[in-house]
Image (cartoon, coloured by chain):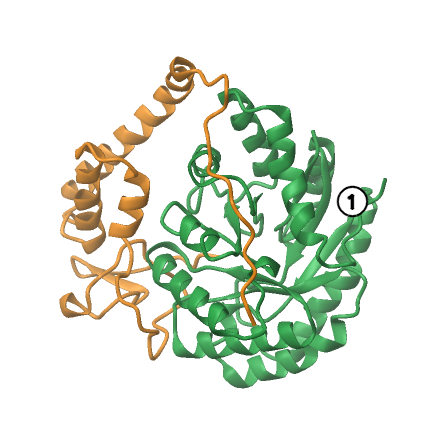
Amino acid sequence: MPKTRSPRSPGQLPANASPRGLVDHGFVPVRAKLIEVAAFLDRVERYGAADDFRCTALRQAAKLLVDGQPERARRILEQLSDPTTKPDAVSTGKAALGAWQPPATGGGKGTGKVNVKGKMKVAAAHR
Amino acid sequence: MRYIEPHGHMVSRTTDDYQAMVTAGCQAVCEPAFWAGYDRSSVDGFRDYFRQLTEYEPARAAKFLLPHFSWLCINPKESEDLALAADVLAMIPEFLAKPNVLGIGEIGLNRNTRNELKVLEQHVDLAVKHDQLILVHTPHLEDKLKGTRLIVDLLLSHQGVKPGRVIIDHVEEHTVRYVLDRGFWAGITLYPDSKSSPPRAVDMLETAGHDRIWLNSACDWGVSDPLAVPKTAFEMRRRGHTAEFVDEVLYQNPVRFLSQCPKFRLGA
């Protein structure tokens, strides 16, 4: 059976867009989030967890913020994603962890438990 | 303003939320079956849940003059138990004729496993056999990209699936075009800590277009906001989008998709 596809129009900015207004409304909340990222990276260093694969992934992803290329959100999401293509043989738990861990570096993706300096942390299950 | 909440797990919410949603302009709420936060122990647990979705919850919503619709399935988080999944799939047809049931959902993948894929395919078979709309959940976080591709491949390889009758939910910047370009509808979920924020959702509308997209709060028992959809309307208006644009995205788009089921009817 042929797949039905209706044509799709591209997105566009509003006719009366206000670039200055966008910055006025958005700058302070985003400034706060950027400082949260910085403080988080400082915090995990103080606690000796900076080598957790998720923290490493966060630092790598942050480099995309300042590479001068567009579609930063899409590229960061892709960089944090599991790049494999085959379904897994068994489930390793209900919860995703937020960053992909190559199998060769410690148990494969999504063990549900992450060894951080000898402590076992159980990730919360997402809905 | 008026809007549709096309994905809300109202069994997890208080009546205060119904009041707030109606006050904000909600015209209808649609509730997919999902994970309760724990695995149900038997098919009877699902039977009780489906009765809640098709009998009790519509009556609770009606007290606030809000039409309530539902979708049925076993959630991918409980799909590893193939025997239980088979029992639930066999029971679902008993409920498909209920007046508020719109289709099969939210089916999909959680950790992208072979068993989850088997149960997803069985749900798709069921939906096609009974000519039902399909609502698909895509995985979380690092699993979303791979899971979305596996889901789309399965759907496109199924002879009976019409992409225009399938909505693939929880898209983000790395999956929205992949879904839309293959003829499916896409849902953007507005969550405080994951999935999409209101500003990112409007970014996607501005860059990927707004045809075949709906926005939802997916409010449930976790950190979520039943008013996320009307709050996103405010973000659109603040950027300069017209009231007509807001209405098209938040009301007309979901009505267009959901009206493919003849049971989806709104009052005057």
Quadrant of the image for the N terminus of chain B? top right
Which residue is rendered at x = 29% and y = 64% of the image?
Answer: A113
| Left or right of B254, for residue B180 | left
What is the residue that sits farthest to the bottom in this orientation?
Answer: B83
Instruction: Determine the chain carrying the residue at label 1.
Output: B
Which residue is rendered at x = 38% and y = 13% of the image?
Answer: A20
Element on which disc 1 rests: loop
How many marks can you see?
1
| Left or right of B161, for residue A78 | left
In percent of width and height, residue A109 lies at: 27, 66
Which residue is rendered at x = 73% and y = 55% of the image?
Answer: B69
Q: Note whether A39 is above or below B45 in the view shown.
A: above
Q: Note whether A41 is above or below B51 in the view shown.
A: above
* Dot 1 alpha-carbon crowd within 10 angstroms: few under 14, some 14 to 19, many 20 or more: many
In percent of width and height, residue B3 lies at: 67, 37
Quadrant in the picture for residue A118: bottom left
Quadrant in the picture for residue B31: bottom right
The residue wearing badge 1 is B66
Callout 1 amino acid: Leu
User: Which lettered chain is shown in green?
Assistant: B
| Towards the viewer: A10 or A126 | A10
Quadrant of the image for the C terminus of chain B? top right
In percent of width and height, residue B209 lies at: 48, 39
User: Which lettered chain is shown in orange?
Assistant: A
Which residue is rendered at x = 17% and y = 36% of the image?
Answer: A42
In percent of width and height, residue B102 lies at: 71, 61
